[in-house]
Amino acid sequence: MIFKVNLEEEVIKSLETGVFDKDDIEPHIGLIVQSLEKHIPRPVIYNGYGVYFCSVCHGSLWQIKCESNYCFRCGQKVDWNNIKMPL
Ligand SMILES: [Zn+2]
């Protein structure tokens, strides 16, 4: 069992070393999947008036594209080559 103060760091260490008890990792699978999903580039939404939005949290993104490939609000990786217009 993992009984450390920083549980997330202990889970990461367990995964990196390959030494872990399945029961210790299983409660964190949702968080692990959620973290990996943040690294899958998602389209950006363009409102037609110079503002781009994250397609996950719908927060506005930096307008200078090269400044960030990640949403500074939710951490989602964004794909500036895949721009969608709102429906
Ligand atoms: Zn976002």
Image (spheres, rainbow, N blue to C red):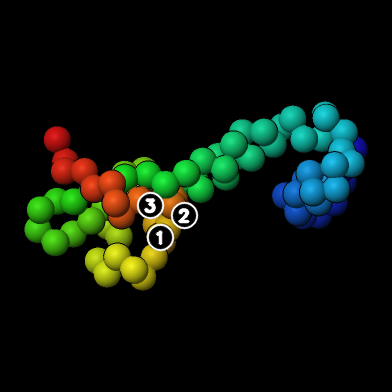
Q: Which residue sits at x=47%, y=44%?
A: 40
Q: Amino acid at mark 2?
A: Gly
29 to 3, vertically: above or below: above
N-terminal label among 1 and 2? 1
Q: Which residue sits at x=89%, y=41%?
A: 19
Q: Amino acid at mark 1?
A: Asn
Q: Amino acid at mark 3?
A: Val
* Rendering coords of residue 22 (x, y %): 83, 30
Q: Nearer the viewer, mark 2 or mark 3?
A: 3
**Mark pair 1, 2: CA separation:** 9 Å
Query: Camera-side residue: 75 or 80?
Result: 80
* Crowd around label 1: few <14 · some 14–19 · many ≥20 (10 Å): some
Question: In this figure, which residue is indicated by the disc labeled 1?
Answer: 69
- Residue lying farthest front? 81
**Mark pair 3, 1: CA separation:** 5 Å
Rendered image: mark on residue 78: 3
N-terminal label among 3 and 1? 1
Distance from mark 3 CB to nearest ligand 1 atom below 8 Å: yes
Q: Secondary structure at mark 1?
A: loop
Q: Quadrant of the N terminus?
A: top right
Distance from mark 1 CB to nearest ligand 1 atom below 8 Å: no
CB atoms of marks 2 and 3 within 8 Å: no
Question: In this figure, which residue is indicated by the disc labeled 2?
Answer: 75
CB atoms of marks 3 and 1 within 8 Å: yes
Distance from mark 2 CB to nearest ligand 1 atom below 8 Å: yes
Q: Nearer the viewer, mark 1 or mark 2?
A: 1
* Rendering coords of residue 56 (x, y %): 36, 43
